[in-house]
Amino acid sequence: MTQYQGDSSYKDKLVIVIGGTSGIGFAVAKACVEHGAKVVVAGRSQGKVDGAIERLRTVADEQSKVRGYICDLSSPDVEENVRLLFDFATHNRDHKVHHIVNTAGQMGSPLALKDTTAEDVLNICQARVVGDVIIAKLSLQYLEASHTSSYTMTGGLGTYKPVAGYSVRDGLGGAKDALARSLALEIKPIRVNLINPGAVQTELFDQFAGMCGEEVIDGIRGKAVLGRIGQPEDLAEAYLGIMKNYFITGSIVNIDGGYQLT
């Protein structure tokens, strides 16, 4: 009989968290480090990467278990960027990766349909979808080919509760749903899943709150069944749960405090 998988599920596992320098990604990286995993965080700037490494090493049992690398998924050179990240993480393929998490993304400003250009659509697609595809493609060369390995993507609830002015972003969120299910078939036995967070108090959310005002934030809070804005740590629990649940793949997990129910 298979024993219950406790916290030892993460011990010395190699986890790459793209977008792991802040917000939900940092919370995921921190939780992995606290459970004894070897973690590589990736962000778009050296300053953010260095800052995340410094903070994560305060909770690591060994400082060498925490490393970081610059990787920009919005770059036209995204495939080379991801390849270099994976080479760095695995010491040029001397080791296998066990889990990849991608939380990278930007909230973005509203974009009215009448003002939308083809270039806008391509740029948003690059940032929200292309990176996920390239990560999946290259993961086959670096992830251990096992049902114990996982790739977890991050979307948003706009797919299910769209907002005017975010048609392109919300539409591409639907593409992520389909992509997660398709990739689960194409790169099996590696498990692929998608988490769609609701309102979570990250640095990006704080920027959004600053633009919209407290009244809008109170409205968002009031529409959640639980009556609160989520915290990054709430979401981190879900990512770690997916990593160690060896029977979940092709799943879309919405974590929103009941926002969709109202």
Image: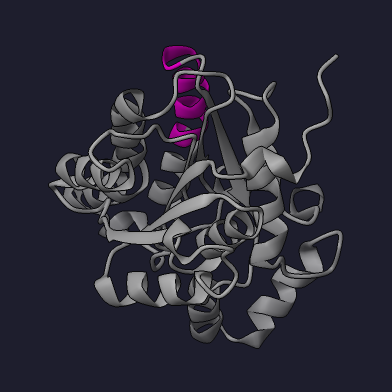
Residue 138 appears in the rendering: yes
Residue 108, image x and y in percent? 39, 65
Residue 103 visible within the image: no
Magenta stretch mostly in which secondary structure?
helix
Query: Residue, x 66% and y 77% (percent of image)?
Result: 217
Q: Position of residue 162 (x, y in %)?
A: 56, 50
Q: Position of residue 225 (x, y in %)?
A: 86, 59
Magenta-colored stretch includes residue 251? no
Q: Residue at x 41, y 41 (%)?
A: 172
Question: How is the protein colored in the picture?
Answer: one colour
In the rendered structure, the answer to whether residue 157 lies left or right of residue 78 reads right
- Between residues 184 and 215, which one lies in front from this camera angle? 184
Decide if residue 243 is on the left or right side of residue 85.
Answer: right
Give residue 30's quadrant in the image: bottom right
Q: Which residues are magenta?
A: 175-187
Q: Name the residue located 22 percent from the left edge and 40 percent from the top edge.
A: 83
